[in-house]
Image: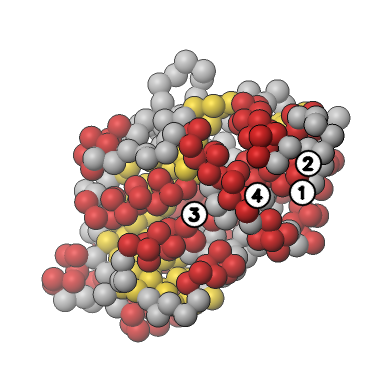
Amino acid sequence: MSIIVTGGAGFIGSNFVLDWLAQSDEMVINLDKLSYAGNLENLSSLQGNSSHQFVKGDIADTNLLVALFAQYQPRAVINFAAESHVDRSILGPGEFVQTNIVGTFNLLEAVRAYWGALPAVQKTAFRFLHVSTDEVYGSLAPDAPAFTETHRYEPNSPYSASKAASDHLVRAYHHTYGLPVLTTNCSNNYGPYHFPEKLIPLMIVNALAGKPLPVYGDGQQVRDWLYVKDHCSAIRRVLEGGTLGDVYNVGGWNEKPNLEIVQTVCALLDELRPRADGVSYAEQVTYVTDRPGHDRRYAIDASKIERELNWKPAETFSTGIRKTVEWYLANESWVANVQSGSYRDWVTANYVERQA
């Protein structure tokens, strides 16, 4: 038996593959096109593991998908493949439309053809799990209830709009064709192997390099924070026991403003890797012009997955953020290797040019 994981060399996907193979010898076929955030170094510990088969390719490549399904006969497909950064979607929305919408459509078509031809027993057991985001729900007022699975979609960026479109396609393929789908909408992930363009790893990397710590606007944008390994355990649980066609919100029950996140990272670095001059890393905080259409607050109500599937996060924010900072301090060579020239150019365009 096997599963196909798309986007399995990215941040969340690679953590999922590593956790899966730490608990199971079921083969994982890992399909990733290795765009800027896909990194095979994330999977270096699996070298020589016959249960992990990496395939470089695009979910928009129908011929490749058909060949993979025919060769490996998977019992499930878990779709992590996506362009996932709001700022990049503002600068270049076309890639997000191509991967998140067209790619998901092509993947669904290939899955539908494969699933439709399976014998009855395998057809009943098959699952397609689509990994999405809380950003499809839009922005919340400070005192508004958290997003539930029935919250109306109101995406506000090209990224979230493209993910919303992919969610709608997945839903439609279930209701139109009977495809056995499951969807998860997660809050902000953090943890090991996070590409250093996102808030937490960017703060760690810049702090250690003595660079400014760029904070958008007033830094009071609120997000719910989910440790990536908790997210992986939730996906495994939904794949195992989720109701077909249903959506499950996956959150960490950790609503915090961005500025508090930055201050927490600085405090941990002050403790674990203090500056030579004895000054707090918080002195490096620099406020920059806010990004266009920046959603003010996201919050996930994850009570459904706890109620129906008995899942809840194992990590608090305090334990998860400490593990994350410790991982980056112990893996500085990984950070150096992912900081290519194109990454540095992107950081300059998005942060340096915004500084007041």
On the image, numbered disc 4 is attached to which residue? 329
The residue carrying pointer 2 sits among few (fewer than 14), some (14 to 19) or many (20 or more) residues within 10 Å by Cα, namely many
On the image, numbered disc 1 is attached to which residue? 347
The residue carrying pointer 4 sits among few (fewer than 14), some (14 to 19) or many (20 or more) residues within 10 Å by Cα, namely some
Cβ–Cβ below 8 Å for labels 4 and 1? Answer: no
Q: Amino acid at mark 3?
A: Ile
Cβ–Cβ below 8 Å for labels 4 and 3? Answer: no
Q: Amino acid at mark 4?
A: Leu
Sequence-earlier tag: 4 or 1? 4
For the residues marked 4 and 1, what is the alpha-carbon distance in whole angstroms?
A: 21 Å
Left or right: residue 313 versus residue 307 is right
Q: Secondary structure at mark 2?
A: loop
The residue carrying pointer 1 sits among few (fewer than 14), some (14 to 19) or many (20 or more) residues within 10 Å by Cα, namely some
Picture quadrant of residue 156: top right
Quarter occupied by the C terminus: top right
Left or right: residue 140 versus residue 117 is right
Residue drawn at (66%, 30%) of the image: 267
On the image, numbered disc 2 is attached to which residue? 351
For the residues marked 2 and 1, what is the alpha-carbon distance in whole angstroms?
A: 6 Å
